[in-house]
């Protein structure tokens, strides 16, 4: 039986149309942003109309206009900026201590396979503890001020950053390590000039994962004990059955998360651009 060669499959009409429409990556990006904004505006309009007509319960789901009124009132009184500043400070300091500190520890574990194997089960055990369980203990140990919140945020981040950075260090090309050793490079020189740069992609991935964990840790810490912050705002609203206050706090958390993600993306671009030089 003779071999048959199948003809190349022509691009479908849909793929040809998409290729023609998105002539550049910028066009596709702007179109996606337009669609995302349209979806958000459409959902908010449906929510507001449903609340005004009685189709959606205002008691259970509030409405966009009520949420905006809460934000405007708290902005006018100065409480909104104080809440955002408090939560941001707790998140950023705890993120630096936990995520960046954990990344440094994970990279340093490259120096000793014995110590890393010895510490592995303890790291896994610590990582299995939910932040909600450790929060009350942290409040008892460190008090109700900023330090306890920072420690809870750091605890939320440290294990993920430690494991991802260590895994990145272990993935360093062994041939390159052997090449540097053949030139009598010291262990610290190999670590600084090869292991750390080659692990940056893993380190940044750990930082991106930990942004959400850090913000969640700050909110949980404010649930336990606080007199300011977005978590305190949400707790205050839930205790008074004020769904508009609760959802206003949730909206703030979402906005803060988007801002933090944007900052981490800028950091990633900077590190990768520096890595290519």
Image (spheres, grey):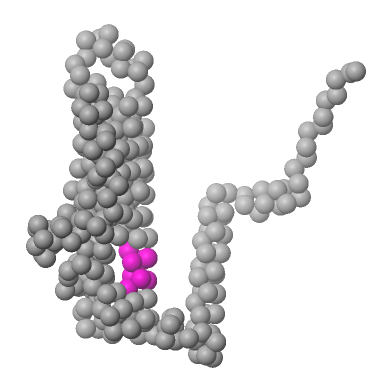
Where is residue 162, by image quadrant? Answer: top left
> Observer-nearest residue: 47 or 197?
47
Q: Quadrant of the N terminus?
A: top right
Q: Residue at x 9, y 57 (%)?
A: 141
Which residues are the magenta region? 249-256
Name the spot of residue 149 as percent of width and height, x first.
Answer: 17, 60
Instruction: Decide which of 8, 160 is in the foreground and name it.
Output: 160
Q: Eyeballing the image, is 247 above or below 15? A: below
Q: Residue at (18%, 22%) from the top-left corner?
A: 188
- Relative to 127, does residue 188 appear above or below in the rendering? above
Query: Which percent across, then down, holds residue 229?
Result: 22, 70
Q: Residue at x 35, y 48 (%)?
A: 209
Magenta stretch encompasses residue 23: no
Quadrant of residue 216 within the rendered picture: bottom left
Report the side of 270 relative to 25 (left or right).
Answer: left
Q: Main secondary structure of the magenta part?
A: helix
Q: Residue at x 56, y 59 (%)?
A: 31
Decide if residue 198 is on the left or right side of residue 57.
Answer: left
Q: Nearer the viewer, residue 132 or 9?
A: 132
Q: Is residue 154 visible?
A: yes
Q: Position of residue 51 (x, y in %)?
A: 49, 86
Residue 98 location, x and y as percent?
Answer: 21, 47
């Amino acid at each position: 039986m003779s071999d048959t060669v199948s003809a190349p499959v022509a691009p479908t009409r849909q793929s040809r149309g998409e290729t023609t429409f998105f002539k550049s990556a910028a066009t596709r990006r702007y179109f996606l942003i337009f669609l995302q904004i349209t979806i958000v505006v459409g959902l908010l309009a449906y929510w507001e109309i449903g609340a005004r007509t009685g189709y959606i319960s205002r008691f259970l789901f509030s409405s966009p206009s009520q949420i905006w009124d809460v934000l405007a009132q708290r902005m006018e009184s100065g409480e909104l900026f104080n809440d955002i500043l408090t939560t941001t400070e707790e998140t950023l300091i705890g993120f630096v201590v936990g995520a960046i500190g954990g990344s440094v520890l994970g990279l340093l574990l490259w120096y000793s396979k014995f110590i890393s194997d010895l510490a592995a089960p303890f790291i896994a055990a610590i990582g299995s503890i939910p932040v909600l369980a450790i929060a009350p203990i942290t409040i008892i140990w460190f008090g109700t001020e900023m330090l306890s919140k920072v420690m809870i945020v750091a605890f939320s981040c440290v294990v993920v950053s430690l494991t991802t950075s260590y895994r990145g260090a272990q993935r360093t090309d062994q041939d390159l390590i052997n090449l540097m050793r053949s030139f009598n490079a010291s262990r610290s020189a190999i670590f600084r000039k090869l292991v750390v740069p080659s692990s940056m992609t893993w380190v940044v991935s750990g930082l991106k994962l930990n942004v959400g964990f850090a913000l969640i840790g700050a909110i949980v810490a404010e649930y336990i004990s606080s007199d300011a912050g977005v978590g305190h705002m949400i707790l205050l609203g839930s205790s008074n059955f004020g769904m508009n206050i609760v959802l206003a706090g949730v909206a703030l958390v979402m906005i803060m998360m988007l801002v933090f993600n944007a900052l981490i993306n800028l950091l990633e671009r900077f590190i990768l651009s520096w890595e290519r030089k």
